[in-house]
Amino acid sequence: MGVRVVRSSGTWPSDQLVLWPRVLFVDWHGVLTKAPLWFSIRWNERHPFRPRLETKTADLFGNRWQTVDDWMRGRYTAAEIVALLAIDQPLSARSDYFLRQLYQDCIAMPLHGPLIHALHHAATSWHIVIATDNMDCLVTMARRRRDIRGFSDDLISSSDVRVLKAEDPVGFFGTWLDRRGLTFADAVLLDDGKDNCQAFERAGGRSCFVRSPDDAASAVWDLLNTGR
């Protein structure tokens, strides 16, 4: 068993070596949080700009799913996506309102409390790494969040590694594992995507498919109770 290193203030991920023989990769959307992009607008039925944004995001995540995948592969920036959406800017808002709100909501996304509590316990004997198919805006702001530093060692995003988890798990997870002398046999993936879980298992790891953040919290406790 390794000795947990308490990180000094400021740097994350930590440059200090923490010796744990296993790693738990945790998905972001659908596991750590249910909040969508622009959640402060899309979850607020009384927000004056919600109708125009909902129309555009419905098209983006419906008819333009390939564009979303390419955004998650790092082929688009958030600014390019907002420009592509061509959302009608309200006269009462600044010209970059929707781009700024996108970033602000990424840093303010509420995380699931019971799961975070479980992950804090798991972090005393596991590496905890956020592993997400996600966009540049989320990654930029997540790395500034103090609330994820207390339980996670690092963050891997498809927008950085340029592949999605299901299409190339070795390309997504392999570099992180290799640098720490670990393999897929030392790893567990906690994810709400069946394709992601199946691909991870084909690569040699174990997975916990979950349908909600509550399921994810229960899965973490099960891992801790069984010691596996």
Image (spheres, rainbow, N blue to C red):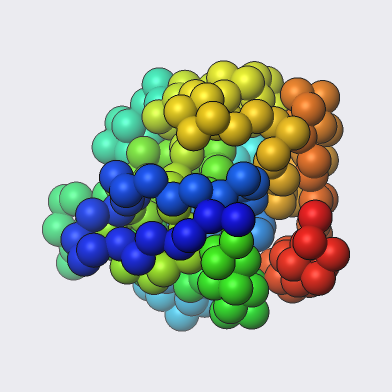
Quadrant where the C terminus sits is bottom right
Instruction: Identify the residue shown where x is 80% and y is 41%.
Output: 206
The picture places residue 95, in percent across and down from the top left corner, at 16, 51
Q: Is residue 222 above or below residue 201?
A: below
Taking 176 as reference, is 173 left or right?
right
Look at the picture and state if 175 lies above or below 150: above
Residue 62 falls in image quadrant = top right
Q: Residue at x 57, y 24 (%)?
A: 174
Quadrant hosting residue 144: bottom left
Q: Is residue 213 left or right of residue 223?
A: left
x%, y% of residue 184?
69, 31
Q: Residue at x 72, y 45 (%)?
A: 188
Question: Based on the displayed image, in which of its 4 quarters is residue 91 positioned?
Answer: bottom left
Q: Number of callouts in the render?
A: 0
Image quadrant occupied by the N terminus: bottom right
Q: Is residue 211 above or below residue 62?
A: below
Location of residue 142 with respect to 158 vertically, above or below: below
